[in-house]
Amino acid sequence: MKWNRLSRRESMVAVTFLLPSAIGFALFYLIPFGMGLVYSVLDRPVGGSFVGLANYQELLSSESFRKAVSNTFWFTAVNVPLMLMLSLGIALVLNRNLYLRQFLRMAYVLPLVVPVASVVMVWQVLFDWNGSLNAWLHTAGLEQVDWMKSAWSRGVISVFYLWKHIGYNIILFLAGLQSIPRDYYETADLEGAASGTNCLELHLSI
């Protein structure tokens, strides 16, 4: 009986702590998602009538939608693996006793704390038609490039994305590398391992 009372009390405490998060999740995620599903089968949001899957058929037949899906697939297929490889490589380098190691770590993490709006404005100043990069090209006697309206736009967006988010992945990889026990490094030294990469491979294999 006493155990049942304790269980009920603990359940009430758990529900009390979880209730605000559950309400927020419902208000900002579940309810908007449900309303979006309802609106997707109506011809208009206010006073609309049921049209079934007609909106989805129209969406799939849209050239703009197909282009957006293609760009999203390209962005994910290219930038996600590139992000992982670069962040892991930089984390392996920063995990060593390098000169100015702390400064380099701060330099990679700093873009995370900069507001996105400010970063977009800076990159716009650089890559705009009348921006700094085109001004340098003009000074060097080279042809100006409309970076955001040409084939270069994907590359510019990728560089911006990697620069803005690579610090977060570096933090995660550094935390993993620094959590490796010293015994593994000593074992790797005894077995002739000469780099942090080999140590990491030894840790993963164990």
Image: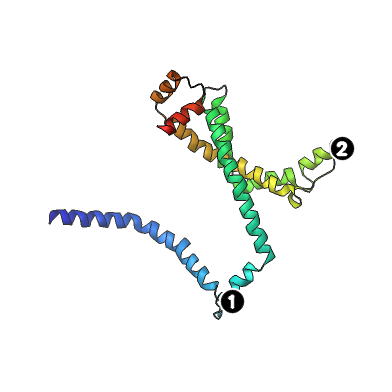
Between 131 and 141, the one lying in front of the other is: 141
Residue under pointer 2: 141
Three-letter amino acid code at the position of disc 1: Arg
Quadrant including the C terminus:
top left
Q: Position of residue 48 (x, y in %)?
A: 56, 79
Q: Position of residue 189 (x, y in %)?
A: 45, 19
Q: How is the image coloured?
A: rainbow
Answer whether labels 2 and 1 touch (C-beta < 8 Å).
no
Left or right: where does residue 204 sit relative to residue 123? left
Q: Residues within 10 Å of mark 1 (few under 14, many from 20)?
A: few
Q: Position of residue 36 (x, y in %)?
A: 52, 68
Left or right: where does residue 14 sit relative to residue 70? left
Left or right: where does residue 145 sit relative to residue 123? right
Q: Secondary structure at mark 2?
A: loop
Q: Position of residue 173 (x, y in %)?
A: 49, 36
Residue under pointer 1: 44
Q: Earlier in the sequence, mark 2 or mark 1?
A: 1
Q: Quadrant of residue 93?
A: top right
Q: Residue at x 69, y 48 (%)?
A: 154
Q: Residue furthest right?
A: 141
Q: Give the answer, above or below, for where 10 lies relative to 175.
A: below
